[in-house]
Structure formats: structure tokens, C-alpha cells
Image (cartoon, helix red, strand yellow):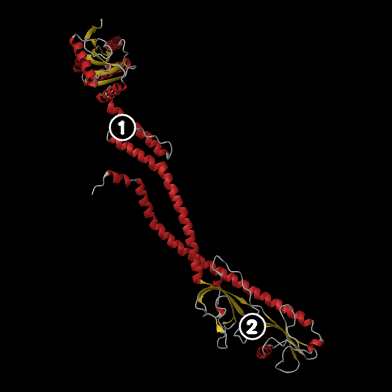
Amino acid sequence: MRLNYPILRRLGLGAHLAVVVALAAIPTSLLIIEFIESERREAIEDAEKWTQRAATLVAERRQHVIATTRTVLTATAAQLDASARSQSCATPPTGNGEIVWMIAPNGEILCSTTSGFPLSQSVIEELLEDIVDPGFAVMGPYLSGAGRAQLFGALTIRAADGTTWHVIRAIDLAWQPAYDEDLGGPADFVVMTIDDEGLIYHRLGPGADLPIAPDGKLRPAPPFHASTLVGTSTLMDIDGVPRIFGAASIPETGDTVMVGLSQDAVSSKAKRDLIADLALFAAALTLSGVLAWLTLERMVLRSLRRLRDAAVATASGEPSDRVEITDGPIELRELAHAFNDMKDKLEFQAFHDQLTGLGNRRYIEQRMAALLQDGEPFAILAVDLDGFKPINDTYGHAVGDFVLAEAANRLKAEFQDGLFIGRTGGDEFLAGIAVDGERPADMASQVATRVLEGLGRPITLPDGTQETISGSVGIAFWAGNGTTADDVIRQADAALYRAKRSGRNRFVSPDAPEPQAGCSSSKAIRIPS
């Protein structure tokens, strides 16, 4: 089905650009999907780096706590005197000669004759059984009755009198690094400590409330041995959540610290952030697109539509204004300038004779209609060349055209102050001049006289030969009274016919009409030779 013009107008350049944008959206969508996946992978990589750094920080912190514990225990042991040696916080399993002191984190002794010792007798027995040589050692982990495990620093001293001192301090395992909000929330962040057998004895974060020794034994870590863990790994945690783990060892104890982030939480957080960024990007892109479209509309499409409408009007023969484009791309301004030049040439060709450059019949009709609308009096001079046909027959059409062009130039010079001058066909011309209401015949006669004198001058042909022509002029006047353009032209043609019939090389003019009178009478005037 053939589309009509209004539909074609609506499916113009703007629609084509919209189609291009729509087609561009397909690969753009694929790129966005790939970008989302790339951002997810990057978020996982960032999480792996962070968990590794966090595990290293926790391990370094544990080493610092162990060193501090040793310093505190050494300072406390140095202050023990003979009076204190007679006291013990607990009953040693081996009998006499052993004293156990429990030291608080601030160095104060926790036990006294009234408070009792804070550790169970079974833990004390297990701890003292593990101590082999005097000096400082990290002991544990030891299970408490609540299903929790604890690590201790123990300093063993053997006095000269054979007494053995055991100064014990719990090691704080509660410290954890600050979580990275760009990777996930605190609910997604866990810290685990596992011993050299791969058993968990301490956990912070999600799953911390899970008993680490539900059956009296430490719960094993996710399925890998701590000594084989290098860098980061994604593992299924004991609470059933896949996590990205980073690990670092503690040489003093042989333990391993594991820091984990939920893989799903990291991916979800990355997707949420990415979607927010994409939404912002889409909003910015939409705004940029709207601004670009408005700019394109103002600087390109609007000008193109003006050029299109002007071209359609010109092709249809309808009058149209010149297209003036002052902004936008220079190519459009150049196109508008070229179009205006083409339009001027087409209009000139439509209203002018190609040989002489004078107006044609359409031009004469247009000018006559404008003069009648103005209502000012004017005279019409019909001019016919005398002696042209013999020259045209003798020398040919090329020379005849040359003579016509030369005669037209002379007429144009004589009527340069007139209202119009045009060629009606062959060797016939029609001109209009303005006259006043008092002496129109005198004014027209003066012009006609100059016309005949100009036409009578010899014409030098292209081969150097000189030929002479003359002219006959018929004059008619318009002064209102309902006379039409055709009436005036017929009167001028009739006067021209009388001039040629009267001997040629002369003009015939009717008497000047009285106001509101018609052009009834005429007289012939012959130019003296």
C-alpha cells in the first residue's frame, strides 16, 4: 500500500532517528547485561581482597593480644611474694607444690579466699596436664560447660623451693575488623578461628549462636584443612550460607583465622548498587537524549522541514518565501543558500524570457494584476519590431536571436524607470509606465519617442555587418473606471496595429482620458526622419 504524504511527513528524519536509537538499544542492552555481570565479578574480587586483608588484620590482632598477655603475666608473676605463694585459686590435680592464679585482663588477680576460682576444676586439670615446661605458652582451646571454647595464656614458674606457679590469663578473641559497607552489611560478615586440626573453636557474626561442640567435640570447619588454605575461597559455611573466605595463620598457636562474607549478599549488594547507578545513568542518558533531541530539533530538523516545505511548494508551483537559516550546522546554511539561489533561478525562468531576460507573459500578467490592485494610473506600450523578419530570414535564427537580445537591451534601458517590460512573443514586447492624471499622453509620447529612437540605431551583427530595424508602438491608458488588464492590453494592441498599418516606425496613442473617462479616441504621430 502506498503511503500518502501526511504519513510520509510523520515518518521523516525524526522517525528514522528513532528507529536508529531503537536498534542501538539492542546491543546496548547486551552491553548492559555484560556490564552487570562484570560488575558482579568485580564485586566478588573486591570481596576476596577484603576478606584476605581482614583475615590478616585479625591474625595480627591475635598476635598482639598474645604478646600483651605474655607481658601482663610476666609482670604479675614478678610481683608474687611469699605470702601469696601460700594461696591458690584452685586445687592442683597433682597435689602439693603447685599454685594457680587467674589474672584479669587488667592484671588483677581474679581469685581470693572468698571468691573462688572462675574456671571449672575439669578445665584446670586439663590445662595443667598440657603444661610441660616452665615458661609462657598459649593453651587451648578448652570447652566450657556452655558449649563454648576458650584460649588461655599460661606462664609457668618453678621457684627454688620447688613450688610451681601457674599464672593464667584468658586471651580475648572478640575483636573483629570494621566491615566494608560497599561490600555488604554486618549481618553478612563472620570471623572464625580454627585450630590446626581444622576444628572451629571461636566464631563471630552470623552463626555465632551455633554450638561449636554440640556433641562435646569441636565442630569441623567448612570442608578443607586450614593448613591447605591459601588466599581466598568460596565455601559453604556451617550455617548453610555460601561465603567468600579469606584466611591467615597465627604462628604462635598454629591456628587459622577465617573471615567470610556472604557471596549472595555481595552479589545482591553489587546488583543493587549497579541498578541504582544504571538508573542514575539512564536518567542522565534520557535527559541528555531529550536535550540532544531538542537541540537536533532546533538546529537541524526544524530547518530541514522548512527546506522540505519550501521545496514541495516550489515543485508544486506555489509561492514560497526564501528559507533563511541563521543557526545550526554550516552545511544546512549552505544548503539553504543554494536552495534560495535555485529557487530564484527557477522563479526567474518561470517569469522571464530565456533569450532576452525580459519578463514573459506570466510576469506581465502578475505585474498588471498588481498595478490594478494599486489603483494608480498607468500607460501600456505595445512594441513591435519593424524589419526584424528579413534579418532573421537572411542571417538565420542565431543572428535573429542576437538582434532580439540587442533590441531587448535597448528597450530595457529606455524602460528602466518604468513599471515593467516584457516580451510577449516573437518580436513583440509590452511595457508599463506610470503617468499622472493631467498629461498622460505627453508622458507616454516622450517615452515612445525615446523607444523608437533607440530601436532605430544601427545594430552591429556578430560578423561586423550593420543592420537597422525600427519599431511600432501602440499606447493605451488605464485610469480606473472598471477597465481590466485585458482591456488595456487589447487597446494597446489595437493602437500598435494602427501604427504598423500607418507606415510603421511610429507610435499611436489615444487622447489622454478625462478623469473617470474611457479611452475612446486616438491619434497617430509619426516620428520625423
Q: Position of residue 165 (x, y in %)?
A: 75, 87
For the residues labelled 2 and 1, the Cα–Cα distance comes to 100 Å
> Which residue, as the protein is rendered here, is positioned at the far left?
501
Residue 396 in view of the camera: yes
In the rendered image, which residue does mark 1 sit on? 319
Tell which of 126 and 393 is nearer to you. Answer: 126
Q: Position of residue 344 (x, y in %)?
A: 33, 30
Q: Is residue 46 left or right of residue 419?
A: right
> Which residue, as the protein is rendered here, is positioned at the far top?
528
> Which residue, as the protein is rendered here, is positioned at the far right?
82
Q: Which residue shows up at 40% across the image and 39% down it?
A: 331
Q: Amino acid at mark 2?
A: Gln
Q: Amino acid at mark 1?
A: Pro
In the rendered image, which residue does mark 2 sit on? 150
SS state under label 2: strand
Question: Is the residue 38 above or below the residue 231 in the image?
Answer: above
Question: Is the residue 137 above or below the residue 525 in the image?
Answer: below
Q: Quadrant of residue 159?
A: bottom right
